[in-house]
Image: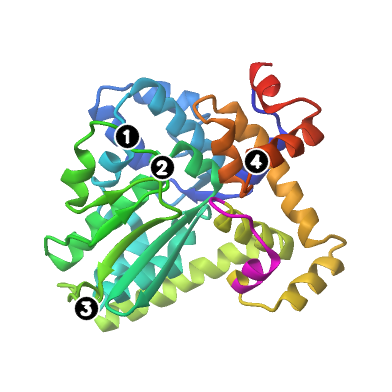
Amino acid sequence: MIDAQSKIAVNRLTNLARIPLLIVEYAEQSGIDRGDLLQRASLSAENLSDPDKRISVAALLELWRAVLEKEDDTAIGVSIGSTCSAKRLGIVGYAMYYSRDLLQAFQRFARYVHIISEAVQIDIATEGEQTTVSFSAHPSLFALRHPVEAQIAALMTVGREITQTDLVPLAIHLPFPHPGASKRYKVVFRCPVHFEQPHAAIVFTAAQMRLAVTASDPTLSGYLDELASSTLDALAVQDEGFVDAVRRALWSESPGGKPNVWRTASEMGISVRTLQRRLREKGTSFSAVLEELRRELAGDLIANKKLAVSDVAFLLGYSEPSAFRRAFRRWHGVSPRRFRSA
């Protein structure tokens, strides 16, 4: 059972039809009926007729769930991501394809990733001789695991494509349990994969970031920058406002640690005082926004019976499962276990 309130957060977010198309095409090749998958996700052929149409992240989640019910491959996200190409990412992929080097390509991906999906955020940080590309996503995507692993595999695959090299990073970090005997992680990533880590990330050498992109074209990439920026601006105009921006920052930092006002303000590029003042102007507060976001997400995550209560607590940024259980009972009037069995 997933109540209407718990779906609000993902229904506010959209992604390009390119993502479900990638999933559906892979599933078809595995013998899964396309019509059945689309029906389960409340999608139609018309929804996917144009790769640049936008569909809700909620529909994407239902599509993933439908595939996972029919396919027991523990590394299916990695497998799907490895079928990606720059062209499949549309304007964002083309901007990467004509970049100067791998770092610039990844920076463009991070800058424009909301065109592909508003439920994803990418951060790039260089420290010494290492560059880390970190992945944040809506907690519901982390709960399914495979969408996040698909993102990482896709970026690795596109990186190899545009540099025409056998790009092998130093390590992959995944905040998920070890999947068991699957060899796909080694085949696709070709590097050590560390599970149960605090964050999802790819670690490269700084030298790898300087790898030349073979089709580099500064004039064309500049034009694509303008087009991608305009597309991103158009999405921003549709945003519901400052409170939603705070919510987005919160879900990107929730898994693995309690969100706080200082980190959220830093994520948004504003001061704590400005954050608090603007929320007061909207008739709310940081703690109220965090509480409401967790309440909306909790029902959906608990309804996923593959997740332990402790996993849901982790995804929502609680340091202790007991604190989450108390909050859940306050929101829903029953314990997470009782809610799940209803």
Give the structural element (helix, strand or loop) at label 4.
helix
Magenta residues, as a range? 255-266
| Residue 268: x %, y % from top left | 62, 71
The residue identified by callout 1 is: 179
User: What residue type is disc 2 on?
Assistant: Phe
The residue identified by callout 4 is: 297
Q: Is residue 44 visible?
A: no
Separation (CA) of disc 3 from disc 1: 33 Å
The residue identified by callout 3 is: 210
Pointer 1 or 4: first along the chain: 1
The answer to which of 16 and 327 lies nearer the viewer is 327
Few, some or many residues within 10 Å of mark 3 (<14, 14–19, 20+) = few
The answer to which of 298 and 70 lies nearer the viewer is 298
Say whether marks 1 and 2 touch (CB < 8 Å): yes
Tell me, yes or no, whether the highlighted magenta stretch contains residue 265: yes
| Residue 253: x %, y % from top left | 57, 58
Q: From the viewer's perspective, is residue 182 above or below residue 261?
A: above
Give the structural element (helix, strand or loop) at label 3.
loop
Give the structural element (helix, strand or loop) at label 2.
loop
Residue 115 is tagged as none
The residue identified by callout 2 is: 176
* Count of labels in the image: 4
Q: Residue at x 47, y 73 (%)?
A: 229
Separation (CA) of disc 2 from disc 3: 30 Å
The answer to which of 85 and 252 lies nearer the viewer is 252
Pointer 3 or 1: first along the chain: 1
Question: Which mark's residue is nearer the viewer, 2 or 3?
Answer: 2
Separation (CA) of disc 1 from disc 2: 8 Å
Q: From the viewer's perspective, is residue 342 above or below residue 107?
A: above
Quadrant placement of the N terminus? top right
